[in-house]
Image (cartoon, grey):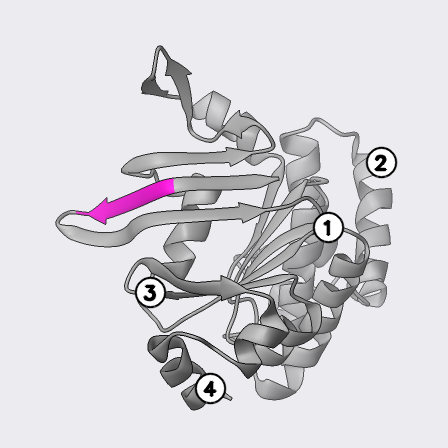
Amino acid sequence: MVRIQDVHKFFGSHHVLCGIDMTVRQGEVSVIIGPSGSGKSTLLRCINMLETISAGRIYVREDLIGFREVKGQLHDLTPKQVAVQRRDIGMVFQRFNLFPHRTALQNIIEAPTQVKRVSKTSARTKAMELLDRVGLADHANHYPAQLSGGQQQRVAIARALAMEPELMLFDEPTSALDPELVGDVLNVMKDLAKSGMTMIVVTHEIGFAREVGDTLTFMDAGVVVESGDPRELIANPQHARTQEFLSRVL
């Protein structure tokens, strides 16, 4: 589903991603952990074309993301072409990014009706199904300010799913939540994983990685330090930097 080849990203002279290689199979839950500033979120933003890579290639399915290749040379896609690629990639952020002046239901139907030109009736039916799936069917007409952080994040997940993506990216989806609200969001993500959704999850929730992840990648200073089966890597990390990190978070 996702193939990342020798990806580099610079912000000015700051080398944020230093030759990342990664593969995510269809239906797999790939979890990425690491300290702040290690490049985890930047990598997700590059997959979703919210940031443009400086070198390397990213493929989703077999589509080269953000570029077209002509005789070995890469050329930027137009914003319209990027938008078409992005439709199949859902993303959930640390901050929920809901429209504050729209209800939960209205937030969810916005993209399908405006981008995919789905009828409002069909979009509303699908949105109510998704709200029910995330346990918020009775909050359809609530505005974000009337919802807890955990409820807002579940609406954000439903909003991403409304576009029927092939790939879901989660950028520390529970880091802004009060501890007692984390479980509800993780349960929705676990349900998604069981349904076969391909997911790349940046998180500090080591328990989620151990229970749900198919692969676990530890990043530090813009490189992949170690990657493997989550249960094995957590129980017996091979690299000293991974050992140090896990000793502080477990």
Residue type beneath disc 4: Val
State the SS at label 3. Answer: loop
Q: Is residue 81 above or below residue 198?
A: above
The residues colored magenta run: 6-11
Q: Are marks 4 and 3 in contact (CB under 8 Å)?
A: no
Give the mark nearer the N terminus: 1 vs 2: 2
Q: Quadrant of the N terminus?
A: top right
Q: Residues within 10 Å of mark 4 (few under 14, many from 20)?
A: few
User: Can you identify the residue that label 2 sits on?
Assistant: 122
Query: Residue 192: x, y in percent?
Result: 75, 58
Q: Name the residue nearer the viewer: 73 or 110.
A: 73
User: Can you identify the residue that label 4 sits on?
Assistant: 249
User: Can you identify the residue that label 1 sits on?
Assistant: 197
Tell me, yes or no, if residue 147 can be seen here: no
Left/right of residue 113 with respect to residue 90 in the rendered view? right
Q: Residues within 10 Å of mark 1 (few under 14, many from 20)?
A: some
Give the mark nearer the N terminus: 4 vs 3: 3
Residue type beneath disc 1: Met
The Cα–Cα distance between marks 1 and 2, rounded to whole angstroms, is 22 Å
Residue type beneath disc 3: Ser
State the SS at label 4. Answer: helix
User: Can you identify the residue that label 3 sits on?
Assistant: 38
